[in-house]
Amino acid sequence: MNDWCEDKSVVVTGAASGLGRAVALRFAELGARVVIGDVDPRGADVIEEIVDRGGVHAVQLPRCLNSR
């Protein structure tokens, strides 16, 4: 882990797949708390579980982030 990510939180939108997933997992590897945002609740659940199992805290934002 890098010290600069410890005690930091990051918000990653689109975290259930693709680049967002890779970014969320990388920040978790570096020790940052990850706030997960995605419209795919099952995919977001999977990422939250992976991050939590790695010993880093993850939480999810509400399912829809648009401004309808």
Image (cartoon, rainbow, N blue to C red):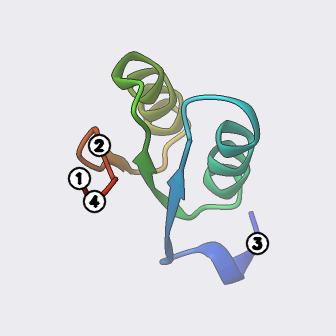
Residue at mark 2: 64
Quick one: label 4, few (<14), some, or many (20+) residues within 10 Å? Answer: few
Amino acid, disc 1: Arg
Q: Which residue is mark 3?
A: 2
Q: Badge 3: how crowded within 10 Å, few (<14), some, or many (20+)?
A: few
Pointer 1 with pointer 4, Cβ within 8 A: yes
Q: Going 29% across and 50% down the picture, which residue do you hit?
A: 61
Secondary element at tag 3: loop
Disc 3 residue type (three-letter): Asn
Q: Are marks 1 and 2 in contact (CB under 8 Å)?
A: yes
Instruction: Tell me the mark number nearer the camera, choosing from 3 and 1.
Output: 1
For the point 47% across and 21% down, which residue is it? 43
| Label 4 vs 3, first from the N-terminus | 3
Circle 2 or circle 3, nearest the eye: 2
Verify CB contact (< 8 Å) between mark 4 and mark 3.
Answer: no
Helix, strand or loop at disc 1? loop
Q: Earlier in the sequence, mark 2 or mark 3?
A: 3
- Mark linked to residue 67: 4
Q: CA distance from mark 1 to mark 2?
A: 9 Å
Q: Which residue is mark 1?
A: 68
Where is residue 62 shown, x and y percent of the image? 23, 45
| Circle on res. 24 | none
Q: CA distance from mark 3 to mark 1?
A: 39 Å
Cα distance between the residues tagged 2 and 3: 32 Å
Question: Is mark 3 in CB contact (under 8 Å) with mark 1?
Answer: no
Which mark lies nearer to you, 2 or 4?
Answer: 4
Identify which amino acid the numbered label 2 is placed on: Cys
- Residue 1: x, y in percent? 74, 63
Label 4 sits on a secondary structure element that is loop
Give residue 2's position: percent from left, percent from top: 76, 72
Compared with residue 26, is residue 44 higher up or lower down, i.e. above or below? above
